Amino acid sequence: MNILLINGSPHEYGCIYTALQEMAGQFEKRGARAEIFWIGNRPIQGCIDCKSCWGKGKCVFDDDCVNQCIQKIMEADGLVIGSPVYFGGIAGGLKCVLDRVFYDAKRLFAGKAAAGVVSCRRGGAGNVFDQLNKYFTISSMPVVSSQYWNSVHGDAPEEVRADLEGMQTLRLTADNMIWMLQAAQAAKAAGILPFERETRVKTSFYKP
Ligand SMILES: Cc1cc2nc3c(=O)[nH]c(=O)nc-3n(C[C@H](O)[C@H](O)[C@H](O)COP(=O)(O)O)c2cc1C
């Protein structure tokens, strides 16, 4: 079982890394393989809605981590995405990555278990948690829950490590993700598969 954890902070070893590392340890304790993937801190192009990706599952801009992210998610059974809170919202670089990753390739991610993780010094975690879940719930990805909404509080790794409830919440998320994936494996072995999907209908509000 492979779990991909995306670090969406510009800090390679900051608060989000500390949170993801806690989860990675728990995944490994349960026998899964965990990889933390950092999106880096170089400028990242936002989505320009050119639609070149449609039907290809690949972004037209190939000079950053976006296509690598798509490939890694395709190879993973479970996905965790971590973001720091920036002015009450998702971190800008990560937003650019996720919009381009999910615009077309989201149809390829159905069935992969997913969870968002947020770190902040003080406020805005709930909003970012909701924002991350939006990517999963538009992609038929089952969202893994826990004993609280996944957030840790701190401005530095040692502060995050001191957030004992936050860290426990993340370990439980990891356990619940593994249980969900094991249940999906058992269901598949028993011949219980997802229902055939209807052809996608797409209507805008102003024209049918
Ligand atoms: C531009 C910017 C905006 C931020 N906005 C918020 C905020 O709205 N609320 C908050 O609690 N912390 C805010 N922070 C603090 C970070 O969310 C917090 O330090 C986070 O844990 C850093 O995670 P990292 O070390 O993985 O980058 C902000 C930090 C930056 C750089």
Image (cartoon, helix red, strand yellow):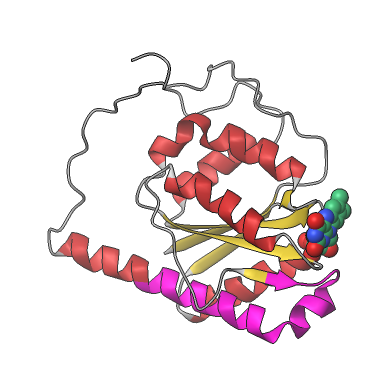
Give the side of residue 100 with respect to residue 157, left or right: left
Residue 74 found in image quarter: top left
Where in the figure is residue 165, as x and y percent of width and height?
64, 84
Rendered-image quarter of ligand 1: bottom right
- Give the camera-side residue of 140 and 62: 140
- Quarter of the image where the C terminus is located: top left
Instruction: State whether residue 21 is above or below residue 141.
Output: below
Could you tell me if residue 67 is visible in this image?
no
Where in the figure is residue 24, as x and y percent of width and height?
59, 71
Instruction: State whether residue 116 is above or below residue 49.
Output: below
Residue at image position (59%, 49%) is: 131
Tally the marks.
Answer: 0
- Give the camera-side residue of 85 and 47: 85
Instruction: State whether residue 7 is above or below residue 109.
Output: below
Region rendered in magenta: 152-179
Residue 64 found in image quarter: top right
- Quarter of the image where the N terminus is located: bottom left
Give the side of residue 47 with respect to residue 114, left or right: right
Could you tell me if residue 157 is visible in this image?
yes
Q: Residue furthest front?
A: 206
Instruction: State whether residue 169 is above or below residue 112.
Output: below
Q: Was residue 115 drawn as part of the magenta stretch in this picture?
A: no
Where in the figure is residue 76, as x and y percent of width and height?
46, 53
- Main secondary structure of the magenta stretch: helix
Q: Residue furthest left?
A: 191
Give the side of residue 42 with respect to residue 152, left or right: right
Where in the figure is residue 58, as x and y percent of width and height?
53, 28
